[in-house]
Image (cartoon, rainbow, N blue to C red):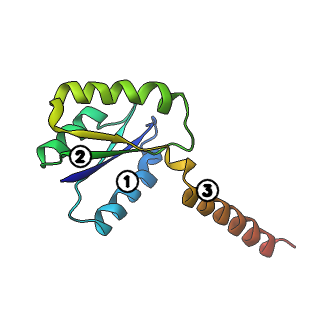
Amino acid sequence: MDGMLLFAHGARDPAWASPFKELAARLALSRPAMPMALAFLELMEPGIETAADSLVAQGCRRIHIVPLFLGASGHVRRDIPPLIERLRERHGDGIEWLLHPAIGEQDGVINAMAAASLAMAEAAGAKAP
């Protein structure tokens, strides 16, 4: 069974996680049969190991790790691969860990951000005197 692990940076302000929690909720609604987990690199819980353990406990044998970063930052390039290697060591060969590119580098996300940016500018322009 496939599972999805959404992986975000984390912040001190709990409100920062709201869009990520909303994303996880929407994905869970659209794919109720696919186990989902949201994890954070730092400053927030759960961490990646706790989230991964949860997915494995639900029977997932292939886990899609989606970095919720706008670009392939140092975190994506340097920090995440060793974390995944630790997950491999922790869970053995029976689990496939698939690291996907940073979400912000996907065409659909770039198009959505462009459309949202234009919509905000146009809405502000309509209100301007």
Q: Which mark is residue 21?
A: 1
Q: Give the left or right position of residue 77, taking residue 128 as reference.
A: left
Residue 121 screen position, x and y as percent: 75, 65
Give how far apart the Cα atoms at labels 1 and 3 are.
Answer: 20 Å
Q: Nearer the viewer, mark 1 or mark 2?
A: 2
Identify residue type, mark 2: Arg
Circle 1: is it few (<14), some (14-19), or many (20+) Cα within 10 Å? Answer: some
Give how far apart the Cα atoms at labels 1 and 2 are.
Answer: 22 Å
Which image quarter holds the C terminus? bottom right
N-terminal of the two: label 1 or label 3? Answer: 1
Residue labelled with disc 3? 110
Circle 2: is it few (<14), some (14-19), or many (20+) Cα within 10 Å? Answer: some
Q: Nearer the viewer, mark 1 or mark 3?
A: 3
Residue 67 screen position, x and y as percent: 44, 42
Give how far apart the Cα atoms at labels 2 and 3 are.
Answer: 27 Å
Q: Nearer the viewer, residue 113 or 100?
A: 100
Q: Residue visible at 40% across and 30% down?
A: 80
Q: Residue visible at 18% across and 26% down?
A: 90
Residue labelled with disc 2? 62
Identify residue type, mark 1: Lys
Is residue 117 among the parts visible in the rendering?
yes
Please count the marks in the image.
Answer: 3
Circle 3: is it few (<14), some (14-19), or many (20+) Cα within 10 Å? Answer: some
Identify residue type, mark 3: Ile
N-terminal of the two: label 2 or label 3? Answer: 2
N-terminal of the two: label 1 or label 2? Answer: 1
Residue 41 screen position, x and y as percent: 39, 32
44 to 36, vertically: above or below:
above
